[in-house]
Every structure is written in structure tokens, then in C-alpha cells.
């Protein structure tokens, strides 16, 4: 019984941690839609937004080219 309780606690905490990373959608001013993994990082000094695309590659785009950023899911 004790082992089952520990196993259920580990599974629950793992699912909660996995749910913390939401994908985001970037809408550009020229009409494109970019789906990104996790939350994009904004560099205030350069004005660039760094994100990972759906293939896991790190990309950058100028903040002036982005019209809207929205979260997917939760």
C-alpha cells in the first residue's frame, strides 16, 4: 500500500511538471503564424524574441515583426 502511494505521488508530480510548459503561438504582422515550444524569451536590449520551433531548433525574430503572442492550452 505504501509503495502504491509513493508511486501515485511520483506520477502526479511528474504530470504537474509536464503541464507547466505551454506552447505559444506568435502571429506576425505579415500574416504568418509560428507555433513555438515553451515560452519565447524577449531580449530587451536587442529587441529579439528567441524561441524553439516545433522541430526543436532555436530561432530568433525581431519583436517589431510580432503582432501577438498567445498561449496554447491551459
Image (tube, rainbow, N blue to C red):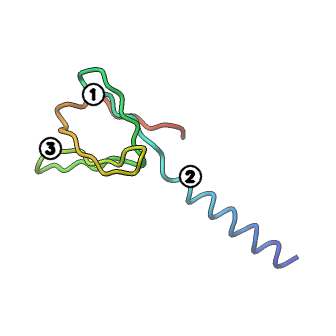
User: Which one is in front, 34 or 71?
Assistant: 34
> Residue at 33% across / 47% down in the picture?
40
Q: Position of residue 13 (x, y in %)?
A: 63, 64
User: Which one is in front, 9 or 56?
Assistant: 56
Q: Position of residue 54 (x, y in %)?
A: 42, 44
Quadrant in the picture for the N terminus: bottom right
Q: Is residue 67 left or right of residue 45?
A: right
Quadrant in the picture for the C terminus: top right
Vertical placement of 2 versus 22: above or below? below
Q: Is residue 46 left or right of residue 31?
A: left
Foreground mark, 1 or 2, reads 1
Mark 3 and mark 2 lie on one chain; the one further toward the N terminus is: 2
* Snapshot quadrant of residue 2: bottom right
Binning the other alpha carbons within 10 Å of mark 2 as few (below 14), some (14 to 19) or many (20 upward) gives few
Residue under pointer 1: 28
Binning the other alpha carbons within 10 Å of mark 1 as few (below 14), some (14 to 19) or many (20 upward) gives some
Q: Position of residue 21 (x, y in %)?
A: 48, 52
Amino acid at each position: 500500500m505504501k509503495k502504491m502511494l509513493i508511486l501515485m505521488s511520483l506520477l502526479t508530480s511528474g504530470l504537474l511538471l509536464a503541464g507547466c510548459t505551454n506552447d505559444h503561438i506568435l502571429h506576425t504582422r505579415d500574416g504568418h503564424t509560428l507555433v513555438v515550444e515553451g515560452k519565447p524569451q524577449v531580449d530587451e536590449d536587442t529587441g529579439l524574441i528567441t524561441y524553439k520551433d516545433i522541430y526543436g531548433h532555436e530561432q530568433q525574430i525581431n519583436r517589431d515583426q510580432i503582432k501577438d503572442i498567445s498561449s496554447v492550452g491551459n
